[in-house]
Amino acid sequence: MNAKEKERLRTLAKKQLELANSPINLARVEDWKRHNAGKRGRPIVHVEIDTFEQEVILPVLECQDATARQLETDLLRNFINFELFDDDWVVAPYFGVQWKTDFHLFGYNITRTTATDVNGHTLGHHFNHVLADLEDDFEKLGKSTWSVDYEATESYRSAAEDAFGDILPVRMVMSSPEAVPTQKVVHLMGMENMFFNMTDYPDLFSQMMQRIADDYIAYHHFLQDNGLLCSTTSFELLKQGSKCFTDCLPEKPHPSLNEIWGFMDSQETVSISPQMYEDLIFPCYRQIAAEFGLLSYGCCEPVSAVWQFVKTLPNLRKVSVSPWCDQKMMGSELKNTNIIFHRKPSPNFLGVDEVLDEAAVRAHIQETLDAAAGCVVEFTQRDVYTVHNNPTKVRRYVEIIREQCEKYYQP
């Protein structure tokens, strides 16, 4: 890292701290606290940039040294939403560093074959499966492994501290731990094989899912017992695309599992019946979910199809309402509760056409607000892979959602 790169990082660190202490940011922090407490008020709006970072972060990177470039990227991620889109993604008054940990289900480090699009970006991929028929391959279910790279973590933390720690405090943080058992199964054997095995060998499949539950819980206890869990009560990332702000959990250096947020989903089981979900999938999920203090559930799957089971989770506080969800049904179920209606609008409006169809966006958002009357509502836009290099379009998209909320939201 040369002097010019260090000065670039220090400039970004100063900007982050300035934005974190701005009146607008501080007011939005209070909105998040009210929102995650399950109190009705204006809906929270956020656009997740992970899938189109190449259009908003990559063009402004200046550092060449690998560590400096990663620090620069992470600093920009902390406040670029605030600057470019003016959504509710609040800016923290510190720079967070996460422990570098690994969890390999049944001991496998799954590899994948990738494809590159016309712009040279890697999007398409295929997982290289290691299991097929459970009756033949059950003995291949080895011991799950996990580890933490203390040296790499400390190296990155130290680099941040040395570069700008006198300006922006550097601290260890943690996103909400995630447990996604059926995603792991699909990576191991593929979706078709998963469905065949559920049908052909339900007993073996149940045994496998029980082992997955046991291993996830053991891994989470490894993190807890080694002081690797961090507080999830404020600016930390809550999967999928949310923030952890809450007064329901303690803010402490080394919390227990039952004192943090967790996240789970089961997108891969959308094609099975609710009964099969209850019999073969939900027991594993229920066991893991019970370990957490609060739970966020769901991603792109229509949670409404299995809501009769998911709603029994006692620590559930946030549930995804995807474009494939029956949002009227979910609105009816979540009305006058403290479980947050976490809407994921269709990405087509923002990501397909170069020019925003404002009338269509307004109608789409109004449909959600009508369905979610009486609910605590949050909008997270995900899965947009291009904004056609036009951040202004994203800013206008956020403005439209806010305008519709002001006009049609019924708390």
Image (spheres, rainbow, N blue to C red):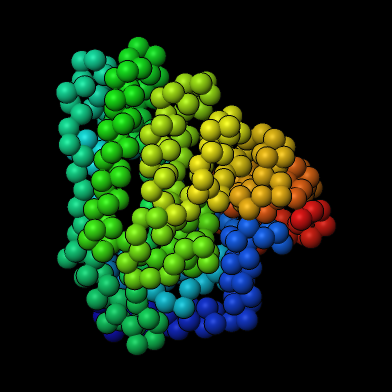
Relative to 325, 411 lies left or right: right
Relative to 331, 12 lies left or right: left
Q: Residue furthest right?
A: 407
Tell me where residue 71 sits by quadrant: bottom left
Question: Depth check: 309 or 228 in front?
Answer: 309
Q: Residue furthest top?
A: 200
Give percent across and percent down for residue 223. Answer: 27, 56
Relative to 331, 67 lies left or right: left
Give percent across and percent down for residue 10. Answer: 38, 83
Q: Residue at x 39, y 74 (%)?
A: 95
Question: Depth check: 399 or 244 in front?
Answer: 244
Q: Residue at x 39, y 55 (%)?
A: 258
Question: Depth check: 101 or 383 in front?
Answer: 101
Tell me where residue 86 sits by quadrant: bottom right
Question: Depth check: 353 or 79 in front?
Answer: 79
Give percent across and percent down for residue 298. Answer: 51, 42
Q: Residue at x 55, y 51 (%)?
A: 317
Give percent across and percent down for residue 331. Answer: 70, 42
In the rendered image, the vertical position of residue 197 relative to residue 152, given as above or below: above
Relative to 137, 255 lies left or right: right
Tell me where residue 137 sits by quadrant: top left
Q: Quarter of the image containing the C terminus?
A: bottom right
Q: Residue furthest bottom?
A: 166
Q: Residue at x 26, y 69 (%)?
A: 156
Quick check: can you spot residue 69? Answer: no
In the rendered image, the vertical position of residue 271 relative to residue 19, given as above or below: above
Q: Quarter of the image containing the N terminus?
A: bottom left
